[in-house]
Image (spheres, coloured by chain):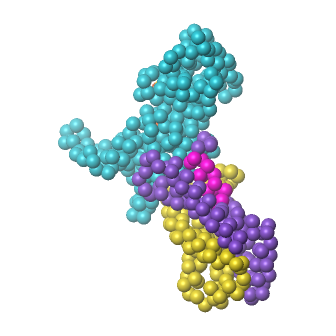
Amino acid sequence: MKGHPGYWAFLVHRVSGVLLTLFLPAHFIALGSALEGAAALDGFLAWTALPAVKFAEWGIVVLLAAHLAGGLRVLLLEFLPWRDWQKTLAALAAAASLGVGLAFALALAV
Amino acid sequence: MDALRVRVWRGAAEGAFQAFEVPRQASQTVLDVVTTIQRVLDPSLAYRFACRVGMCGSCAMTVNGVARWTCRTHVDQVARDGQLEIAPLRNLPVIRDLVADMSPFFDKWARAEGRFRGARTRHDDFERIAPQSAPRRAVDAGIECIGCAVCYASCDVVAQNPEYLGPAALNRAWTLHNDLRDVARRERLRAVAGDAGCHACHTQMGCTERCPKQLTPTASIAGLKRAAAKAWLAGEL
Amino acid sequence: MSARGETLLWLAQRASAAVLALCVTVHLATMVYAIQGGLSAAEILGRTRGHWGWLAFYATFVAAVAVHAPIGLRPVLGEWLGWRGASRDVVLAALALVLGGLGMRAVLGVFG
Ligand code: SF4
Ligand code: SF4
Ligand code: FES
């Protein structure tokens, strides 16, 4: 059954999780280049200053925030007694990830 | 009088929709519409109902794409521009027309140990269970299931994983797990844990969204997950 | 998989999720703070080098991720790609090792 809040919460949670898993090895390898000294890491960071890369970074942060919010939703649903507020939860999760996305976008801009 | 344009599924897995025009009535239910078709327009139409008052759980169908109990669903609530599309429940084999084969659904109740197993006989005293105790309240929250399979037809996991026991059977297992008179709770937890059982549920809540009795199978399934984890930690699973 | 195995995976997934909820919150806050005025290696390394607190934090973070991501991927592979059975679990265990390995290498890299 598609198209209700629980379904969207599930889909966003799943897709963001998969994308984050794909991103992580790259992230670790980049940071691991600190092993080869600050210069290597700086070279990498210079690349991340490109606008397109910045935009992708912003996307990853939003994914992370969305996955966190979706995960909190599941944890609350599974561990707390609840009845009617599950839609509120899905909305809260969306709002929280949006908030983080905006904060990060602002931080990137300044 | 207005006429309602109704498309009704005819056939089994293979088939097609057949169009009917049904007179519009005040307070008409979807089941009334189907009954009118069968009584007046085409006696060969197969469908199922019994109580007509939302107790027996036999009348569920897919109405404009959504699983519903048809006897308690008013045409006003669901018709779009005077049109209705009525099909058998999803996720179950179709026997004919609007009649779905409920065997897989009820077989899964059995596989989920969905039957009470007590140890007392008529010679024993009653078990005393406080109405306000937490387990008794958990039973209350899930006990009104009428076995209509609306939840089962609305669950994406059932559609993807034919082995999945589904929301109704798991909800039933949860009410029995909280029945302190039951003596098969450990076996039941074993039967419902695993990727054909409670751990397959994605907390998507299609079932809870659609259950006509406003039950929350998702919460029952979460309860089973916690119970299974507790049993595992205690070495009892 | 057995009822017991599946229950263990569920527990591990929820436990790692609880740890990650904390870690990710801290990580997101640090990022929003650190990104201001651009990133430089000196700045990152200045914060982390020789700092045992950050080492412990990020080591925990990486361990939780290595548990969490493969378990999360498991049903996705099953439901969207129809990949079930032992081969899936072997590959996912390997993924856990790769994530843990690369992650710890990165943590040690920024530590010292
Ligand atoms: S909450 Fe679980 S059982 Fe209910 S529809 Fe969703 S996946 Fe199915
Ligand atoms: S849980 Fe609700 S939807 Fe599912 S069979 Fe029972 S009454 Fe019907
Ligand atoms: S006919 Fe009995 S529930 Fe609808």
Residue C25 coordinates in the image, percent (x, y): 56, 70
- Residue at 60% in and 36% down: B91
Tell me the quarter of the picture where residue C86 sits.
bottom right
Label the magenta part by its dominant secondary structure. helix
Residue A20 coordinates in the image, percent (x, y): 67, 64
Q: Residue furthest front?
A: A110
* Chain B color in figure: cyan
From this viewpoint, is residue A105 visible? yes
Residue B30 coordinates in the image, percent (x, y): 54, 22
Residue B158 coordinates in the image, percent (x, y): 58, 42
* Chain C color in figure: yellow
Q: Is residue B94 or residue B190 the one in the foreground?
A: B94
- Residue at 66% in and 59% down: A16
Tell me the quarter of the picture where residue A101 sits.
bottom right
Tell me the quarter of the picture where residue B172 sits.
top left
- Residue at 52% in and 60% down: A72
From this viewpoint, is residue B94 visible? no
Rendered position, A27 above or below C72: below
- Relative to C8, B178 lies left or right: left
- Relative to A46, B91 lies left or right: left
**In the image, is residue A13 part of the stretch drawn in magenta?**
yes
Q: Which chain can be seen in purple? A: A
Q: Which residues are magenta?
A: A5-17
Q: Is residue B18 or residue B82 the one in the foreground?
A: B82
**In the image, is residue B108 part of the stretch drawn in magenta?**
no
Rendered position, B54 above or below C14: above
Q: Is residue A36 or residue B105 the one in the foreground?
A: A36
Where is the C terminus of chain B found, in terms of image quarters?
bottom left
